[in-house]
Image (cartoon, rainbow, N blue to C red):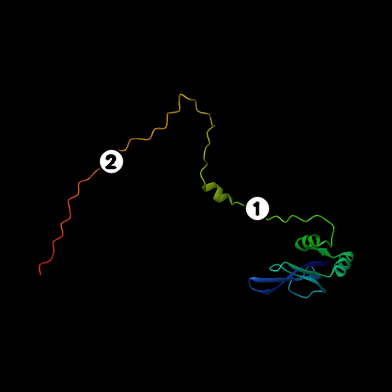
Amino acid sequence: MLAIRFNRTGKRNRAHFRVVVQEHTKAPGKRHVEIVGSYDPHKKTTLLKKDRILYWVGQGAQVSDAVHNMLVREGIVEAKKIAKKMPRPVVKESVVASVPEVKVEEAVAPSEETVAPAVAPEVTPVVEEVAPIVVEEPKA
């Protein structure tokens, strides 16, 4: 089965993508059937061969989620974007077992009788007597 997907090229921290048609079992950087476009995420430029993309989709090529969203954005395909969601991390039971359970008591609105007025405690300043410092001048 053929797939239309991204093939990453470019330097480290400076990605550039080719849009290629290739067998879905091949690694994205390996042998491809045809290059049908390119995408630069830094400059936000997209170059696509619309007629060739529509040809390959007509031949039964499957489009990856990211490429599908790009084709919708560029107006080549009339459809909704595919929401790509990350899977939630699985919490191991050993971690959950080591965390103690916290009991939450029912929240009851306190009545006026039980609420004590908030009064700041009186602070008495502590004054310590310090002996004056005497500096003797050296004799010449």
- Which amino acid type corresponds to the residue marked 1 in the rendered image? Arg
Q: Residue at x 45, y 28 (%)?
A: 115
The residue most toward the front is 140
110 left or right of 135? right
Q: Residue at x 13, y 64 (%)?
A: 137
Task: Give the Cα distance between marks 2 and 1.
Answer: 56 Å
**Between discs 2 and 1, the one toward the N terminus:** 1
Above-or-below relation of 64 to 111: below
100 left or right of 27? left
Q: How many marks?
A: 2
Quarter that holds the N terminus:
bottom right
Q: Nearer the viewer, residue 116 or 1?
A: 116
Quarter of the view holding residue 24: bottom right
Q: Residue at x 32, y 38 (%)?
A: 123
- Which amino acid type corresponds to the residue marked 2 in the rendered image? Pro
Across and down, in percent, residue 121 comes to 35, 35
- Residue that mark 1 sits on: 88
Above-or-below relation of 117 to 78: above
Q: Nearer the viewer, residue 11 or 124?
A: 124
Q: Secondary structure at mark 2?
A: loop
Q: Nearer the viewer, residue 31 or 71?
A: 71
Mark 2 in CB contact with mark 1 (< 8 angstroms)? no
Quarter that holds the C terminus:
bottom left
Q: 10 Å neighbourhood of mark 1: few (<14), some, or many (≥20)?
A: few
The residue most toward the left is 139
- Residue that mark 2 sits on: 125
8 left or right of 21? left
Across and down, in percent, residue 133 comes to 17, 55
Across and down, in percent, residue 117 comes to 42, 29
Labelled disc at residue 1: none
Q: Secondary structure at mark 1?
A: loop
Q: 10 Å neighbourhood of mark 2: few (<14), some, or many (≥20)?
A: few
